[in-house]
Amino acid sequence: MKTLQDWFLTSPVGKYILRKERDFYTNNVKNIFGKFSLQIGMDKTNLLLGNKIVNHYNVTRDINALAQFLPIANDSIDLIVLSHYLEEHNDYKQIIKECNRILAPNGKLIISCLNRHSLIYFFRNKAKLDKYYFRTVTEIEQAMRNNKLNICGGKFFSYTPPIRSNIKLRRLEIFNKMGDRWFPTFANSFTIIADKKIINHTLRMSNPIFKQSSTNTNPIMNTTCNKN
């Protein structure tokens, strides 16, 4: 396993979490509208299936930049999906702050992250996830509130240890049923949805979302829009 994304794409528990999260995204982004959407993290998987926004960008694939310092104008993105990106970076507060900066008024920010209060964290060495930063729901929610974001939804996923066998994982499906009912905050992964409520809305520019140089009208980087 080379990256966290590889773990989600190849391990039994990782694939289970990713499948559940994709279903959750599909159900929650289909009625979000606007001009621009942005996916940060999990660039090999389209997490915006069913969304009606045409101009969809993907950090890493379309934009060669870190999420801490995005070359995107203020208040310009209507939907941001930040999927398992925080685990690879220690400065999660700066990343959420940057997402808030570029998020349009009434825009939605959806964050998915592995949970520090979980069996996967307890067995992180066995799962070869010990180099990643696990977060708690409280930490992410507090960072969102510090940026004046309004939390409006969320979901917990998976409660089993990081088993490497699909057969054994199916035998432990009862863990997932019990977890949702009795101890949801100990899920292996969680997703939080927040929106940006602005009382005095500012006018949004109709030109491309990427920041413009003061001496050049072209975007500071060449990108291609993925409309899939």
Image (spheres, rainbow, N blue to C red):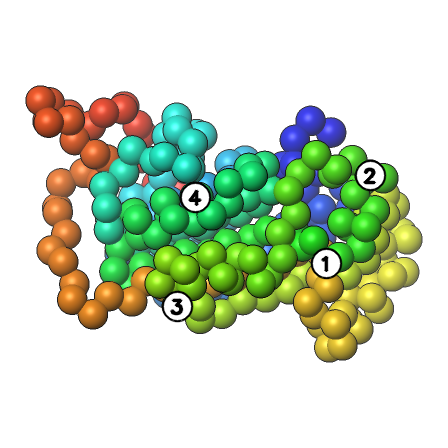
* Location of residue 113 in the rendering, given as x and y in whole percent from the top left corner: 59, 51
Compare marks 2 and 3 and give the one earlier in the sequence. Answer: 2
Query: Which comes sooner in the sequence, label 3 or label 4?
Result: 4
- Residue 94: mark in rendering: 4
Q: Which quadrant of the view contains residue 52?
A: bottom left
Q: What crowding class fits label 2: few (fewer than 14 Cα within 10 Å), some (14-19), or many (20 or more)?
A: few
Q: Are marks 2 and 1 in contact (CB under 8 Å)?
A: no
- For image coordinates 71% across by 46% down, the residue present is 14
| Point 81% across, 50% down: residue | 122
Label disc, if present, on residue 21 of the rendered structure: none
- Residue type at mark 1? His
Q: At 74% across and 38% down in the image, what residue appears?
A: 129
Residue visible at 42% across and 63% down in the picture: 145
Q: Residue 165's spot in the image, x, y percent?
A: 88, 46
Give how far apart the Cα atoms at labels 3 and 4 are: 18 Å
CA–CA distance in space, label 2 to label 3? 35 Å
Say which residue label 3 marks: 150
Q: Earlier in the sequence, mark 4 or mark 1?
A: 4
The residue closer to the viewer here, 23 or 202, is 202
Q: Badge 3, how many Cα within 10 Å: few under 14, some, many 20+? A: some
Q: Amino acid at mark 3?
A: Asn
Secondary structure state at the residue bearing disc 3:
strand
Residue position marked by numbered label 1 in the rendering: 117
Q: Which mark is residue 125?
A: 2
Which kind of residue does numbered mark 2 sit on?
Asn
